[in-house]
Amino acid sequence: DDIFSHIVQAPPDPIFGIANAYKADTSNTKIDLGVGAYRTDEEKPYVFEIIKKLEKEIVNDPTLNKEYLPIEGLADFNKGCQKLMFGQNSPLIASGQIVTAQCLGGTGALRVGFEFVKRHIPGDVYVSKPTWSNHNQVIERAGLNQFEYPYYEPKTKGFNCAGTIECLSQARMGSIVLLHVCAHNPTGVDPTEAEWLQIADVCKRRRLVPFFDCAYQGFASGCIEKDVFAVRKFAELGFQMIVAQSFSKNMGLYNERVGAVHIVTSNKDISARVLSNLKIVIRTICSNPPAIGARIAAKILTDEKYFNAWVEELKTVTGRIIKMRTLLKQELDNLKVPGNWDHITKQTGFFTFTGLTPEQCDLLTKQYHVYLLRSGRMSMAGITSKNVRYLAESIKAVVQ
Ligand code: PMP
């Protein structure tokens, strides 16, 4: 009659597990390339200046209180999210075709989105091979079947467009396709604009439902408008679709859990019915979302001067990551490390998919105190002008 004794140990989360191992390491040359969180060149977490300022204003605002937000979240935040994702003048916003709900970060948006899918448009889900490990778990827990489309081509270290199209053209009609909007995690490889059109074409032909995951808007090209090309193009092409949006990285609001889910329908009346059902999904998962992070984000998204300040600061953040790509590539070239490392500067976003084997990654961690995913994924935000040399030397040691 021991109630819990049958429960077997589950594996640690592949990403947060690495963060813990890094923390426990006492070496002073250790480098954390695990979790996708921004670090300054001093290896410190970073809070955006604009966030600090607005947070203070909000906390001290006597007109605000702690009453529950509506189930679908803060209205100003949701409106701001729509504009950032679909464009200031999106006709879909004007026509009431977009249903939006505030969620607990991007993960909350994915969870709510897939729960909605399971309840109302159940179908197989196609995910990129590889994808962020939590995608697979979230989809599984929503009770949906998943298949992989061959996204990454190890030979070219690039996007396997032909393979993706081929796979999706055999997907069952009405299936859901999970697509990374930009800065693909873990590969750092994104489709070109022309390739997105091919993906749109196969989705149209097979009546597939696009489910976009947007966790890194601003981190691919450095421009928040350009980075959401795929979503806006699909919207323009008339797709009904789902979008999960996260502000964890681009506003540095990680632990405030700020995100949104959008469902694009074909008209305003359907939107009203979709919203009523989306609210039931949310009510049973978390009832209603937290307010402070959303209030901060709403100020940024609805006030031009705050918006501009945010965009400028975001450019500094993404600029440092881009600089580290160039620097690491240079160091590897200087040290004449065997192999071709062009992909480090070709890939975009937070991550580089190094091509290092799991064994090489293990060696990097055990012998050189460099922490990264065993898939070879490296978070570029953990690299600094001070540790890049040591990192390149360590890579050299494990590849030769
Ligand atoms: N999707 C992808 C691809 C991600 O990499 C992340 C963050 N690691 C998320 C969604 C969600 O992040 P969060 O829940 O922290 O907003």
Image (tube, grey):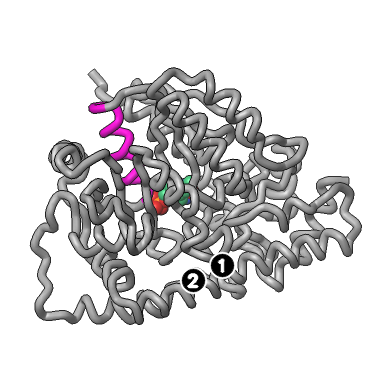
Q: Residue 76: which disc?
A: none
* Disc 2, SS: helix
**Is 367 left or right of 282, judged from the image as shown?**
right
Does the magenta portion include 35?
Answer: no
Q: Position of residue 379 (x, y in %)?
A: 60, 55
Residue 48 lies, with reference to residue 15, above or below; the image says below
Q: CA distance from mark 1 to mark 2?
A: 6 Å
Could you tell me what secondary structure mostly forms the magenta stretch? helix
Q: Position of residue 257 (x, y in %)?
A: 32, 56
* Disc 1, SS: helix
Q: Which residues are magenta?
A: 106-120
Does the magenta portion include 109?
Answer: yes
In the rendered structure, are the residues bearing label 1 and label 2 in contact, judged by CB atoms less than 8 Å apart?
A: yes
Tell me the residue at 68%/49% (across/down).
365
**In-front residue for pair 97/287:** 97
**Image quarter of residue 384:** bottom right
**Is 67 left or right of 166, judged from the image as shown?**
left
